[in-house]
Structure formats: structure tokens, C-alpha cells
Image (spheres, rainbow, N blue to C red):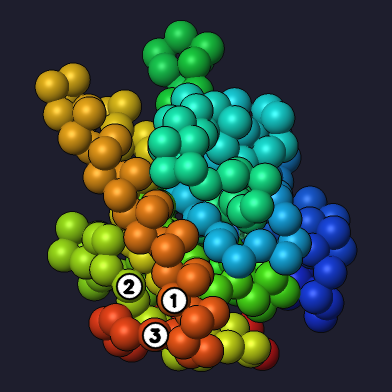
Amino acid sequence: MSGAAAFVPDTHDLAELAEAARGCQGCPLYRDATQTVFGSGRPSARVVLIGEQPGDREDRAGTPFVGPAGRILDKALATAEIDRAELYLTNAVKHFKFTTNERGKRRIHKTPSRTEVEACRPWLLAELDTISPEVVVLLGATAAKSLLGNDFRVSHHRGEILHVTGLTTDGDPALVATIHPSAVLRGPSESRDEAFDGLVADLRTAYATTRTVRNAGSAGSGTFIPAASPVRR
Ligand code: SF4
């Protein structure tokens, strides 16, 4: 597995990156998926949200967060009074990884391997380096581990304002790790409200951090964590 680095052009143009990502063969996941699902949203976004990988609906649509998890995210953003149009949304892995059920009709999500996450990381770093956001929200363990290393546990740090140096060329964004919206759907019905409220609270923390960053003129206070991945160049 060669990884995506050889396919990432030397550009800070999101449209050029997205176009190049369409032809990525940096890991085997491109073979079975319908298409690359690159990030989408405001190129000048102050907040970037990173999920795990596209799901079945996203794979068909070519856009992140348009399926059931996307609907939960939309509801959480609306509750937190955050406008999705102001954000940039992407995934740690750009192709849908799945298995099929016995009759071969239904595609069932499979968690990407650590190797696949690492293979795809150059695209994520390129997106972050291009947008240079003030805050990055890591939705779930895969996104968090992609940037913070395999030992990182969302359950130990969720909702904290984290800092990693060397993630982007132009200033270091604050990071906030939380659950993936799909976790709200997967959990027991009696705890879904609590899970949803936690997601909303973490999104509010992240969004409030943009004001802290601007007012402080720096990354502000928080927990410093060693970078798992270097800036892309
Ligand atoms: S998952 Fe990422 S590294 Fe693998 S082929 Fe798709 S874009 Fe390339």
C-alpha cells in the first residue's frame, strides 16, 4: 500500500485537491467504492469537522455527511446554533469501506484499518493546510487517531481543547474530540438523548473556541498532545 502522498498535488486549491483525489489509488479502498468522497464546505471555514469515512449514501452522492449520521450532525449543529454552511466537513478516509450481507444486496460499513487511515492522511493534511482552520472537530475515534495517534482515546479527552503543533503550516488549530454522530444512532435508545446532548455540548465548545483563538491571538489554553503526524510539507 503506497499511500496517498504520491497523488496529492502541491497546491492550496481545494478544487484541485478534490479533482486529484478522484484518481487516488493510495490504498485498495478505491476498488470497490463508487467514488472518492472529498471534503466539502466553505474554503475559508474557521471550523473543520472530520468524520471517519463516507457511508453508503455518501458513497453514492459523492458528498460527506448526507446520510443518517449526517442528519444527526445537522440536528446537533442546529441545536448548537452553528450554521453548517460556515463549516468544512470531511473524513479521515475518502473511500467507503464495506462488506456485503449474505445476499450481497446490502453494503455494511466496515471500520477502516489503521493502515488505510494512514494511507489517506495526506489528503486530510492537505485539506487542513489549505483551509488553515482555527478549530478542528474530530468526530469519533478514527478521525482522532488519524491526527493524534493510535493511543489517543476520545473517551479520555472528549470536549477538551487540545493542541498539536506542526499540523498546518500557517498556525496550529485547536482540536476538540467528540463522538461520531453515528454513535448516537448505535447506542441504546435510553441513552440516545444523553449522547446527542454530549455531541451538541462538544460542538458548542469547539465553536466557542474560535472566539477564544481570535481574541487571544493564539491557540489559547488547553491540553498539549504530541503530534501523530507531521505537517504535509
Ligand atoms: S481511501 Fe484514501 S488513500 Fe485509499 S484510495 Fe481512497 S483516497 Fe486514496
Residue indicated by mark 1: 212
User: Residue 226 location, x and y as percent?
Assistant: 33, 88
Location of residue 3 by image quarter: bottom right
The residue type indicated by label 1 comes to Thr
Mark 2 residue type:
Ile
Q: Earlier in the sequence, mark 2 or mark 3?
A: 2
Residue 168 in view here: yes
**Relative to the observer, which residue lies in front, 85 or 58?**
85
* For residue 178, above or below residue 59: below
Front residue (pair 43, 30): 43
**Local SS, label 2:** loop
Q: Residues within 10 Å of mark 2 (few under 14, many from 20)?
A: many
Quadrant (top left/top right/bottom left/bottom right) for the N terminus = bottom right
Residue contact at pointers 3 and 1, CB within 8 angstroms: yes
Decide if residue 92 is on the left or right side of residue 34: left
Q: Earlier in the sequence, mark 3 or mark 1?
A: 1
In this rendering, does residue 28 appear at all? no
Q: Are marks 2 and 1 in contact (CB under 8 Å)?
A: yes
In-image side of 125 versus 172 (left or right): right
Tag 2 near tag 3, CB within 8 Å: yes
Q: In the image as oriented, which residue stretches furthest toward the front?
A: 215
Residue at 31% of width from left, 27% of height from top?
185
Question: Quadrant where the C terminus lies?
Answer: bottom right
In the rendered image, residue 93, in percent from the top left (x then y), is placed at 54, 54
Q: Residue at x 18, y 20 (%)?
A: 189
Identify residue for label 3: 220
SS assignment at label 1: helix
Q: Which residue occupies 83% across, 77% down?
A: 11
Where residue 161 is drawn, which disc sits there?
A: 2
Is label 3 in a helix, a strand or a loop?
Answer: loop
Percent across and percent down for residue 66 are 59, 31
Q: Amino acid at mark 3?
A: Gly
